[in-house]
Amino acid sequence: MNIFLKANMRDIAEKEHAYFSQKHHADVAVTQAKRQCKLLMGKPETLLGIAAFGGYKGAVDAMPKAKRNQAMMALGRTALLSLFQ
């Protein structure tokens, strides 16, 4: 009985190690994805693209002033959040 117990304990230890290893790799992947998103949103060309898209939507819409204000608020919010992060 002792042989089976040692084998089971070793199997449990291996599975725990595999679980914590996978958990660590998932945490690292999430951290990298968040960092890449922050870097992407902080680039001037991304912010300019957001503003240009908002301007285009405002120009072709029936209510251009409301869309322009919405686009400017989105641009300002994005820039402000990228500064504080």
Image: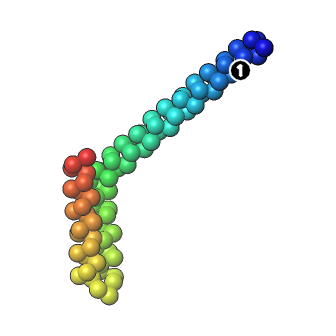
Quarter occupied by residue 65: bottom left
Q: Residue at x 23, y 68 (%)?
A: 73
Q: Is residue 30 above or below residue 53?
A: above
Quadrant position of the N terminus in the picture: top right
Most distant residue in the right direction:
1
Quarter occupied by residue 18: top right
Residue 3 is situated, as x and y percent measured from the top left of the image, at 76, 12
Depth check: 66 or 5 in front?
5
Asked if residue 63 lies left or right of residue 17, the reply is left
Colour scheme of the picture: rainbow
Secondary element at image label 1: helix
Residue 77 is situated, as x and y percent measured from the top left of the image, at 24, 61
- The residue carrying mark 1 is 8
Number of numbered discs overlaid on the protein picture: 1
Depth check: 82 or 7 in front?
7
Most distant residue in the top direction:
2
Q: Residue at x 72, y 17 (%)?
A: 5
Q: Is residue 19 above or below residue 79?
A: above
Q: Residue at x 32, y 62 (%)?
A: 49
Depth check: 46 or 7 in front?
7
Mark 1 burial class by Cα count in 10 Å: few <14, some 14-19, many 20+: few
Residue 33 is situated, as x and y percent measured from the top left of the image, at 42, 44
Q: Is residue 28 above or below residue 60?
A: above
Residue 39 is situated, as x and y percent measured from the top left of the image, at 32, 46
Depth check: 77 or 55 in front?
77
Asked if residue 50 lies left or right of residue 27, the reply is left
Most distant residue in the front direction:
1
Q: Amino acid at mark 1?
A: Asn
